[in-house]
Amino acid sequence: MKPEFKKKAIRSYVIRGGRITQGQRQAFERYWPVYGLSLFDGRLNCGRVFGREAPVVLEIGFGMGDSLVAMAQAEPDKHFIGIEVHPPGVGRLLNNAGKAGLDNLRVYMADAMDVLEDCIADASLARFQLYFPDPWHKKKHHKRRLVQPAFVEQIRQKLKPGGCAHFATDWENYAEHILAVMSSAPGYRNLAGAGNYAPRPDYRPVTKFEQRGQRLGHGVWDLLFERTA
């Protein structure tokens, strides 16, 4: 199983090495037909895919997938769509989702920009999630940061009016960058008030990575913006 790509000028991520375990490989064989979505299927019809209508939550870059699985379990009244390019992470999510018998979760293993453009209808998302994206901390690499004006405008179009874009990062400089980009983006309202970060919503689980960072004194910044127009 390989990610599906179109050619892009600048990638906001790099494909990192990582050995896929036998269990993850078996999860692809067993569960990809259940949970896997393809760019080649075109525009996503959640009513057909899930067999019902429900609010849709889209997450880009779910990593190893533990928090996404936990959210899908905690909010069975919603549909969850995850996008990830890292095969071991996708394999782990498939394995955990399959063992839990989840029926409200699906996944793309493809470039998020392609999924947004080709598969996600405008005004279809109740919530968008981007948690702990690559901060590209070197100044010369800031252009690779996913959160840029064009990207957040694309997300605004995909959100329903009143839908929420939720960002979380443990890099203060990136949090400041996100706050600046979102505060100047038209059609959004900061749910925590102008210039403020938000407390972590109950629906976002605290990951092991985040817990370790907190023990080391690292901060985490959540930002929630509502589509207003």
Image: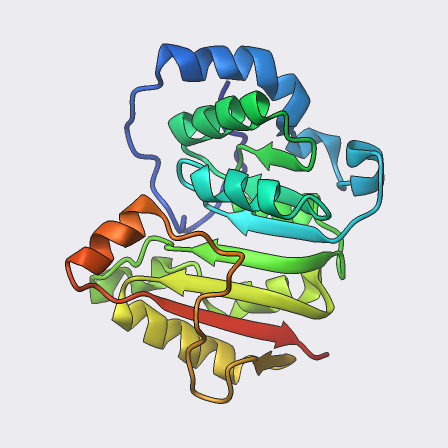
Picture residue at 51% right of the left edge, 82% below the top: 192
**Would residue 3 appear left or right of 164 to someone viewing this image?**
left
Taking depth in this image into account, of 91 and 198 the one nearest to the observer is 198
Residue 104, above or below 184: above
- On the image, the x and y values in percent for residue 134 come to 33, 53
**Would residue 173 appear left or right of 26 to someone viewing this image?**
left
Residue lying at the far left of the rendered structure: 216
Picture residue at 18% right of the left edge, 57% below the top: 215
Res. 174 in view: yes
Residue 211, above or below 32: below
Name the colouring of the figure: rainbow
Q: How many marks?
A: 0
Res. 45 in view: no
Residue 198, above or below 151: below
Picture residue at 70% right of the left edge, 60% below the top: 126
- On the image, the x and y values in percent for residue 109 come to 53, 32
**Would residue 214 appear left or right of 193 to someone viewing this image?**
left
Picture residue at 52% right of the left edge, 71% below the top: 224
**Would residue 198 appear left or right of 160 to someone viewing this image?**
left
Residue 9, above or below 214: above
Taking depth in this image into account, of 16 and 162 the one nearest to the observer is 162
- For the C terminus, give its image quadrant: bottom right
- On the image, the x and y values in percent for residue 162 come to 71, 72
Taking depth in this image into account, of 142 and 27 the one nearest to the observer is 27
